[in-house]
Amino acid sequence: MDDVKLKLMELKQRMNAKPTVNRISALEEQEKRIQDQQEQKETFKRKFKEEQETKKRLKIFDEGEVEDGELEVEKVDPDFAAIMGFGGFRSSKKK
């Protein structure tokens, strides 16, 4: 009976003990790997988006729709914008 109590106390002490340095460093390494992967994903997305934009600009320029490499801006009818729900760049608070 005393052996069981001693083993139980030892187990409780082990559970309450602080994690060792190896565990902490392993967690830090894992967090660092995850952060690196996220940064790589973000850079990939940004590069992909930039490539798509340049392709679109080149396509428009090659088709002769735009001169001197400038993009045309579509003019939107204000009534149509209101129908679509765009009310302009004003605050939503009424004074």
Image: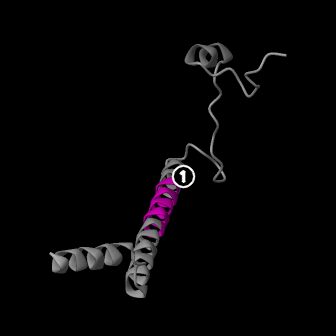
Q: In this view, does 87 lie to the left or right of 94?
A: left
Looking at the image, is 78 positioned above or below residue 22?
above
Prevalent SS, magenta region: helix
Tell me the quarter of the picture where residue 36 sits: bottom left
Residue 10 location (% of width, % of height)? 28, 79
Tell me the quarter of the picture where residue 84 sits: top right
Q: How many marks?
A: 1
Which scheme is used to colour this image of the protein?
one colour
Residue 75 location (% of width, % of height)? 65, 27
- The magenta segment is 39-53
- Residue at the extreme bottom: 22
Q: Quadrant of the C terminus?
A: top right
Looking at this view, is 36 or 88 the one in front? 36
- Give the residue at mark 1: 57
- Answer whether residue 60 is magenta in the image: no
> Label 1 sits on what residue type?
Arg
Q: Which residue is drawn at 43% across and 64% down?
A: 41
Q: In which quarter of the image is the N terminus?
A: bottom left
Residue 43 location (% of width, % of height)? 49, 66
Q: Which residue is drawn at 49% across and 51% down?
A: 56
Looking at the image, is 19 positioned above or below residue 89?
below
Looking at this view, is 15 or 43 the one in front? 15
Q: In this view, does 48 lie to the left or right of 76?
A: left
Looking at this view, is 4 or 59 the one in front? 4
Q: Which residue is drawn at 51% across and 55% down?
A: 58
Q: In this view, does 23 lie to the left or right of 59?
A: left
Bin the neighbour count of mark 1 within 10 Å (Cα to Cα): few under 14, some 14-19, many 20 and up: some
Q: Which residue is drawn at 59% across and 18% down?
A: 85
SS of the residue under disc 1: helix
- Residue at the extreme right: 95
